[in-house]
């Protein structure tokens, strides 16, 4: 199962996501849930990268099928909508494929990740 956690601060700005795991809907190369999530994540990262002039804080681990993005407090307002849109999109996918994708929203102190 893919588990996607999204983080908002006290101002309700989305500032981070952590997505980990395999959908296991179908075999490698045929897994439409994995393809949908991967494509949406890559699009979101590209949009954020094009919006900011600084290097993004991205963590990946291929063995764990992990990708994590953290936005500093200065740029949160600017990119929050991109991350929120990813969250909304993954929620829609999780409704159709609840055994393959779980998405959650976590509220954290606005100073975390600054």
Image (tube, rainbow, N blue to C red):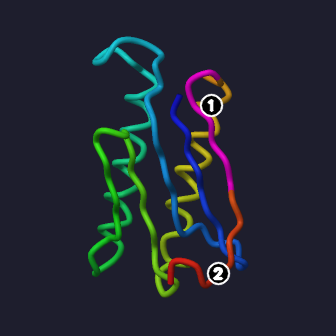
Dot 2 or dot 1: first in sequence order is 1
Task: Write down the quadrant of residue 62 in the picture.
Answer: top left
In magenta, the rendered stretch is 99-105
34 displayed left or right of 46: right
User: In terms of secondary structure, what is the magenta stretch mainly?
Assistant: strand
The residue at the far front in this view is 63
Name the residue rendered at 41%, 47% in the picture.
Answer: 41
Q: Position of residue 82 (x, y in %)?
A: 50, 60
Q: Residues under labels 2 and 1: Cα distance?
A: 27 Å
**Does the stretch in magenta take in 61?**
no
Question: What SS does tag 2 mark?
Answer: loop
Q: Which residue is the site of mark 2?
A: 110
Q: Quick check: 77 left or right of 108?
A: left
Circle 1 residue: 94
Give the image quarter of residue 57: bottom left
Disc tally is 2
Query: Between 32 and 4, which is closer to the camera in this rendering?
Result: 4
Residue 104 at x, y percent in the picture:
67, 48
User: Residue drawn 68% across and 78% down?
Assistant: 109
- Residue 4 sits in quarter: top right
Expressed as whole percent of the image width and height from the top left, the position of residue 7 reads 61, 63
Closer-to-camera residue (9/93): 9
* Residue at image coords 30%, 38%: 63
Q: Is residue 76 left or right of residue 66?
A: right
Q: Is residue 101 magenta?
A: yes
Q: Of 84 and 103, which appears nearest the observer? A: 103
Pointer 2 with pointer 1, Cβ within 8 A: no
| Label 1 SS | helix
Circle 2 Cα neighbour tier, 10 Å, few/some/many (<14 / 14–19 / ≥20) = some
Q: Which mark is residue 22?
A: none
């Amino acid at each position: 199962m893919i588990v996607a956690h999204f983080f908002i601060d006290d101002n309700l700005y989305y500032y981070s996501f952590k997505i980990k795991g395999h959908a296991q809907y179908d075999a490698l190369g045929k897994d439409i849930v994995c393809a949908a999530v991967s494509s949406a994540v890559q699009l979101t990262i590209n949009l954020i990268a094009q919006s900011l002039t600084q290097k993004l804080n991205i963590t990946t681990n291929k063995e764990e099928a992990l990708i994590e993005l953290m936005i500093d407090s200065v740029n949160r307002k600017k990119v929050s909508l991109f991350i929120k849109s990813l969250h909304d999109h993954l929620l829609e996918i999780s409704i159709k494929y609840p055994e393959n994708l779980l998405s959650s929203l976590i509220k954290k102190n606005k100073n975390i990740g600054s």
